[in-house]
Amino acid sequence: MTTTERNVTASTAVAGGARSAGRMLLHGGTIVALIVLVIFFFAMRPDVFLTFTNVRNILYQVSILAIIAGAQTIVMVVGDFDLSVGATSALAGAVAASLMLGGVPMAVAILAALVVGLLIGLVNGLLIAYVNLSAFVATLATMTSVVGLAYLVTAGTTLFNLPAAFTNLGQGRLFEIPLPVFFAIGISVVLWLVLRFTTMGRRWYATGGNAEVSRLSGVNVRRARLIAFTAAGLISAIGGILLAARLGSASAVQGEDNMMFSVAAVFLGMTVIRSGAANLGGTMVGVAIIGVMSNGLNILGVNAYVQQVVTGLIIIAAVTLSSLRHRER
Amino acid sequence: MRRKLAAVAALATAAAMTLAGCSGSSGGGGSTDEPFRVVAFTSGNQTPIGAWWVKAVEQQADELGWDLTMIQGDFDFQKMNPAVESAIGQGADAVFDGFTDYASISSIVTAAKDAGIPIFAVDSGTEPFDGFAVNVTTDQQGIVDQTLDAIGTAIGGLSGKNVMVIGHDPHAGIRMRADLAKKALEAAGATIAGGDIQKVTSPATGRTEALALVADYLAANPNGLDAVWVGWDDAALGAAQAISEAGAAAVVTGVDATSEALAAIQSGTSPLIATVEQPWPEVNAQVTDYITEFQKSGSLPGENFEAVSTTLVDKSNAATITPSDKLG
């Protein structure tokens, strides 16, 4: 082999190595980011960060977001997004609280709140799938109305003095782990099974991949989108009910940041799998990143404003990675 | 053609004279029999106190015979400010600002100045402002003194203690009292937990943000907190919940005297030991008196800023206090 040939081979190998490192970052960037964050915060506070108490803290803090991000994942699988998930969750919590304070039994109040969430999702689905409004316009409009409804239900105040059996759903513990963590895991597993192993899950993915091809293949695209938004409304309501139980109170704007963080979590998760589509496992990695980052920065005493800047930057990075994946496809 | 032109000119002149007559001020001395026209506005109508204020002012207007234009801003200054300016432009004798910081309404102040009418304000800034005829608010230093006194009593003095201060900068009152609390704590020899004021970014998520801040701090520093001073009750309830869940012994104080805070204080089991009642009905009545005086005599208050004293609410008197979210 001549010197020139050897140089070419070496430079090809270096270029190949750089390419595969780039690919690894592109394909596994979110997981790598999570691992880097965990290592970084552990290195900064080895006595605290990975202790049982703190890991439990993180899980507790992200459990409601995990549920709402699960709802967001479904609509993003079908190629849309839902701006009303935060408002729907707040209204559901307010409805449950208001009914219980009015003397309605807890089970009935929770059921009514779930129905409210389901109806909001149904309205979103009808507007988007059958009236052909864009998801942005439709869910922005319903979000506005739902926030107004939540103010009406709460009369602008914070509802409290909720029954102990109800608050126990959000504050109780099993094996020292807060109950919302179990609810979040349970709902996530069910959603993962639905998305991966059911006909509806495949139809959702097919619709999100290419609605026209899906329609020509016999998928009822409209119905698939309708069911996706309805399910998202219902799941958001579960999140809102648990948030009211966790805080022991309900207000019209409770947990309003869950909408933005749920979208961020799904985008972060889209980089995890090869297809670059929304997926539940990836979303949970995204939720974990948001939770770890918030907790770690709090422990390090980083200013909340800086935290907000960092969160925004991470969302930009996630969306950029996600779009690079799409371009690569 | 000439007749038509003359008719149009006559009509225009009549319309101009009518409009000129309409826009003349009827206030500031009660020189005419026309109703006194007040443009009232608040950005905080979606808060319990803001909603109460809207109702209270509408009721006062009925009783006093004011011609009231009430503008509710929903914290949307882009929507509210032009609406208020437009109402001033259509003719008004006075402007009544409820709970809207002067920093957000400079265009309204200019419009009122151009129209030559005064602005009377309830809790619309924490310092004197020349754009207001008067702004009556609560004494922020007094609030800090009362709450820190309650904390000091509960934990055996402030010197050498770790106290977290939680604030929210966009709210002028909370920002000022959080700064004052930090200074007072440092002067008393306490350590500010986390090194500085912990900031909550949104009032809507104040409770969950405060909960996470305190839970994370306690996870990193078990038994590292003696007290948490919080600028408002909703976040104070989140801090108290974090302390309860961590099984820590720290105490918490808030400000506002909401019904939920009062219930927590009365329960005796919550880390929330005290809050502060701000006498909004009395403040509003005081400002209304100033407006009425202006309507009668055209005279304005001698000072453009008043800070009234507040009441510390603890377990001993919580049952006697009207919650701030139940005023209306």
Image: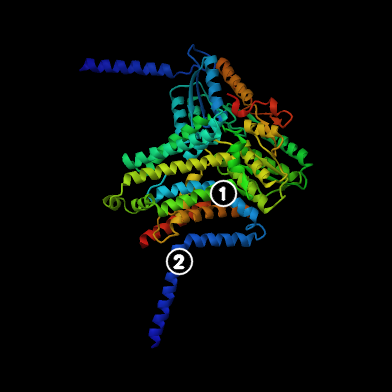
Q: Is residue B17 left or right of residue A314?
A: left
Please, which chain is the residue tagged with disc 1 on? A
- Which of these two is toward me, A24 or B182? A24
Q: Earlier in the sequence, mark 1 or mark 2?
A: 2
- Which of these two is toward me, B247 or B147? B247
- Which of these two is toward me, A248 or A326? A248
x and y percentages locating residue A281 in the rendered image = 47, 56
Q: Which residue lies at the image location 48% right of the left edge and 31% below the top edge? A: B73
Instruction: Tell me the quarter of the image containing the C terminus of chain A.
Output: bottom left
Q: Evaluate whether residue B119 shows in this view.
A: no
* Residue at the disc numbered 1: A181
Within-10-Å neighbours for mark 1: few <14, some 14–19, many 20+: many
Callout 2 secondary element: helix
* Residue at the disc numbered 2: A24
Callout 1 secondary element: helix
x and y percentages locating residue A97 in the rendered image = 55, 33
Q: Amino acid at mark 2?
A: Met
In the picture shown, does residue B68 fall above or below A243? above
Q: Which residue lies at the image location 62% right of the left edge and 23% below the top edge? A: B281
Q: Amino acid at mark 1?
A: Val
Within-10-Å neighbours for mark 2: few <14, some 14–19, many 20+: few
